[in-house]
């Protein structure tokens, strides 16, 4: 199959963001502070909020769904929805603080992959459930990456503008858009394909979360899973067509020729 479009999740695929840290730390602050009285009636422990829990239950989901998933997992009762709102507010404040402090990094293999695809003329779309995705992408200087040796000596078949951020590489961007259904429903990826615009079958999706892989497959798209956390089995179980640990493993020619 010759693909002409590529759709990317952001957190865990393109950027090593502090979302997991923010979700975990925010809940710990609440459970040892304002929610201390209910803590004994839950199954919450700080040690229990592992990376595996984050990847399986929260990763890739819109903020309300992610917060609800954490409350459900730790059996934190929320009869009127107030704790859900409080948790989301606490998490958002923390993530904004971490963004401003620059506590995130680009995955070099992901930026190389994006530039290679762009060089081959593919249409690119960013499709993250997070409303913070654009803030991360807009702070990554592509020119500095290339001149700093990030392409490992590989020549680009196009001229880079003097000022270019990672956000500028995309032909379409639906990050944080209010789709009716979040992942694992395919709405966000179908919206991204329409925005390029290309038929879903001509697009592949790059994801690191099982819910994102399920969303891609539900939308009729080829799904590449990036197992940056040694979670190959989780992505394969979700239906990924291919799983890699690093996007440098992918032969761009095999996708587009």
Image (cartoon, grey):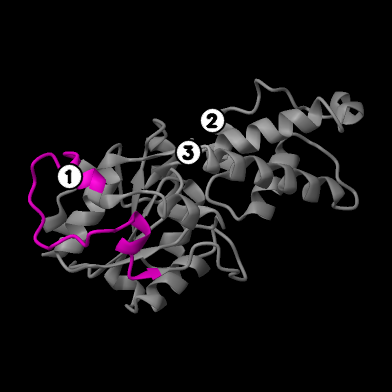
**Circle on res. 238:** none
10 Å crowding of disc 1: few (<14), some (14-19), many (20+)? few
Q: Earlier in the sequence, mark 2 or mark 3?
A: 2
10 Å crowding of disc 3: few (<14), some (14-19), many (20+)? few
Residue 5 is left or right of residue 237, and the answer is left
Residue at horizontal 14 percent and vertical 50 percent from the top = 251
Q: Is residue 13 visible?
A: no
Residue 94 position within the rendered picture, expressed as x and y whole percent measured from the top left: 65, 40
**Circle on res. 147:** 1
**Circle on res. 102:** 3
Q: Can residue 161 be found in the magenta stretch?
A: yes
SS at badge 3: loop
CB within 8 Å, label 2 to label 3: no
**Segment colored magenta:** 144-172
Residue 245 position within the rendered picture, expressed as x and y whole percent measured from the top left: 30, 36
SS at badge 1: helix
Residue at horizontal 79 percent and vertical 36 percent from the top = 75
**How far is mark 1 from mark 3, CA to CA?**
21 Å
């Amino acid at each position: 199959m010759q693909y002409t479009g590529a759709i990317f999740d952001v957190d865990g695929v393109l950027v090593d963001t502090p979302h997991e840290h923010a979700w975990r730390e925010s809940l710990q602050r609440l459970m040892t502070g304002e929610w201390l009285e209910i803590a004994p009636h839950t199954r919450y422990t700080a040690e229990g909020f592992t990376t595996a829990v984050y990847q399986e239950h929260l990763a890739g989901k819109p903020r309300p769904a992610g917060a609800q998933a954490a409350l459900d997992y730790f059996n934190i009762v929320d009869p009127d929805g107030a704790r859900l709102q409080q948790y989301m507010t606490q998490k958002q404040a923390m993530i904004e603080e971490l963004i401003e402090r620059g506590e995130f990094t680009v995955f070099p293999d992901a930026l190389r992959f994006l530039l290679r695809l762009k060089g081959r003329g593919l249409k690119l779309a960013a499709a993250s459930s997070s409303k913070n995705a654009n803030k991360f992408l807009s702070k990554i200087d592509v020119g500095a990456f290339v001149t700093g040796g990030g392409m490992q000596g590989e020549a680009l078949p196009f001229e880079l503008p003097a000022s270019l951020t990672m956000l500028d590489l995309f032909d379409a961007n639906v990050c944080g858009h209010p789709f009716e259904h979040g992942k694992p429903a395919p709405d966000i990826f179908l919206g991204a394909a329409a925005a390029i615009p290309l038929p879903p079958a001509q697009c592949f999706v790059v994801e690191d979360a099982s819910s994102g892989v399920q969303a891609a497959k539900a939308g009729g798209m080829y799904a590449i899973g990036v197992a940056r956390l040694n979670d190959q089995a989780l992505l394969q179980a979700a239906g990924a067509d291919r799983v890699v640990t690093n996007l440098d493993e992918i032969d761009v020619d095999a996708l587009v020729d």
